[in-house]
Image (cartoon, coloured by chain):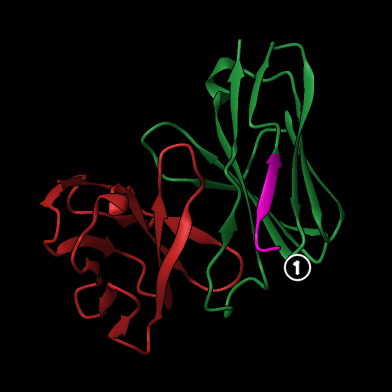
Chain colours: A red, B green
Amino acid sequence: GESVGLHLPTLSVQEGDNSIINCAYSNSASDYFIWYKQESGKGPQFIIDIRSNMDKRQGQRVTVLLNKTVKHLSLQIAATQPGDSAVYFCAENTGGFKTIFGAGTRLFVKA
Amino acid sequence: DTEVTQTPKHLVMGMTNKKSLKCEQHMGHRAMYWYKQKAKKPPELMFVYSYEKLSINESVPSRFSPECPNSSLLNLHLHALQPEDSALYLCASSQEARDTGYGYTFGSGTRLTVV
């Protein structure tokens, strides 16, 4: 079946540097994408979303880029902080109630 | 109140036991979800309720039985589970199926161990 996946299972960055987490999706019908952050012992937390009629969206310290041509999604975190250490999931929605999560990337922030 | 509350936080049950997981939200969300998450894996959708009616059952075994008593509550009844059902069970809610711009609000989950 179609799925959302990630290129890098782990990412280690120095505090203060920028982080980029990538995600590939395969369902061309997906038109809504979300990034979630999951800290240990907690449920996923919404970070930012983007619709397929956009190619970039910015939030506070985070930016999501969408390239529909190559079915690629990325999350950029500016000035990464120790509190950003977590597992990050991209997720896609093709309409209706079903949101599919990608495999996840663990981000380590070194002090 | 912008939270989804799940109880209990931890549950250990035998394979012959019957137990229930509970989820509550007071954000006025009309869609509620159960997800299962194994260690180091993404959440996997189990059930979706919309306006208190079951909308999606992702071919979940009948030993898992969902219930939505009202718009704020979602239960997951467990019976005759197997050790491989041990996982983190996450509840989530959203305003509608989508088009909210806010994704889902997740609870912290119930860590279930089947012995």
Residue furthest toward the right? B69
Whether residue B23 sits left or right of residue A49 in the image: it is right
Measuring 39% from the left and 39% from the top, which residue is drawn there? B41
Residue B25 shown left or right of residue A11 in the figure:
right
Q: Which residues are magenta?
A: B1-6
Mark 1: few/some/many CA within 10 Å (<14, 14-19, 20+): some
Q: Amino acid at mark 1?
A: Arg
Figure check: A1 above or below B66: below
Q: Tell me what residue is drawn at x 47 percent, y 52 percent.
A: A44
Q: Chain of mark 1?
A: B
Number of marks present in the image shown? 1
Q: B113 above or below B105?
A: above
What residue is shown at x 14% (from left), y 46% (from top)? A111
Q: Position of residue B102 (x, y in %)?
A: 53, 73
Residue at screen point 50% across, 43% down: A42
Residue B18 appears left or right of A44: right
Q: Is residue A76 magenta?
A: no
Q: Was residue B4 drawn as part of the magenta stretch in this picture?
A: yes
- Position of residue A110 measured from the top left corner of the image (x, y, whole percent): 14, 45
Q: Secondary structure at mark 1?
A: loop
Quick check: can you spot residue A30?
no
Residue of label 1: B30
Residue located farthest toward the front when viewing the structure as drawn: A111
Q: Residue lying farthest bottom?
A: A53
Nearer the observer, B115 or A95:
B115
In screen coordinates, is B34 left or right of B27? Answer: left
Residue B99 visible in the current orientation = yes
